[in-house]
Amino acid sequence: MSDTISRRSMMTSPPLMMMMLVGIALLIAALVMWSWRGADWGAFVWLAVSVALVAIRTPHLVRNHTNQIVVRRADRLELWMFTGVCLAGLVLPLIHLTTRLFAPADYLLPDWATATGAALQVPVLWLFWRSHADLGRNWSLALEVREGHGLVTHGVYAFVRHPMYAAMALSALSQPLLIHNWIAGFLAIPAFAALCVVRIPLEEAMLREHFGAAYDAYAARTRRIFPGAAMPMGSDRNGGS
């Protein structure tokens, strides 16, 4: 299920647009309600970092969305996995924090576990910012190659091919340490893992098709997600989520 030279961005798809709009609305509601309701400090860290991640990504999303699309891989399964990440990583936590709807699924963790989750937000924020900065106009939300797209091998991409995925993986792993709830916290882990399983092979195929031997040479000298860790799933396309 793929199409090439498509002019529509994944942002125009109803499921993703719905999740983005609901997420933004709930984020505003959470910020307003926090001023008088209060919450666990780990959840407050999660909310603050979520705001920071949106602030990092938004300028790139607005600027790069106008770049002409040369190749696009549109896959329905990948789209729904991406929507699942938005749901588990943003919408469900905000519903829980603003309404306590999932309170029966709460669990207790020691303070050191919450502190560990908070400490992990430092590499999350740095990797997320650095990977966007290094990609520049090569970044896009969907699986796309845009006009003037280059193979980025400098900065953090000189060491790993998936720094943005690394940031998201750390974020997903730390979410249940900050939000102590099986639905609003823990579900972020399987949702992100499912996205990687579906999306990375699509990205890998597109990059190799577009950059050929140059990408193969780059892949041979770098790790996929974390330095020293050879992950079995594909490679970052220098422009992924």
Image (cartoon, helix red, strand yellow):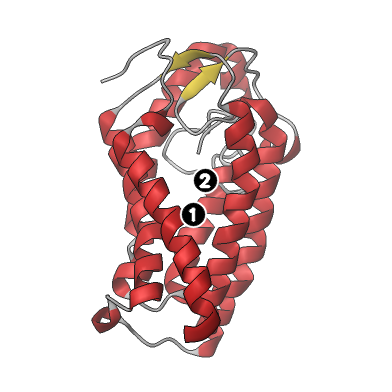
Is any part of residue 83 visible from this angle?
A: yes
Q: Residues within 10 Å of mark 1 (few under 14, many from 20)?
A: some
- What kind of residue is marked 2? Tyr
Quick one: 25 or 122, which is closer to the camera?
25
The reply to whether residue 38 is visible in this rendering is: no
- Residue that mark 2 sits on: 165
Helix, strand or loop at label 2? It is: helix
| Number of on-image labels | 2
Tell me the amino acid under the disc marked 1: Ala
Measuring from the top left, give residue 92's x and y in whole percent: 34, 63
Judging by the rendered image, the residue that carries numbered circle 1 is 169
* x 51%, y 84%: residue: 36
Q: Nearer the viewer, residue 229 or 80?
A: 80
- Cα distance, mark 2 to mark 1? 6 Å
- Find out whether the residues at labels 2 and 1 contact each other: C-beta distance under 8 Å: yes
Residue at point 60%, 44% (across, down)? 57
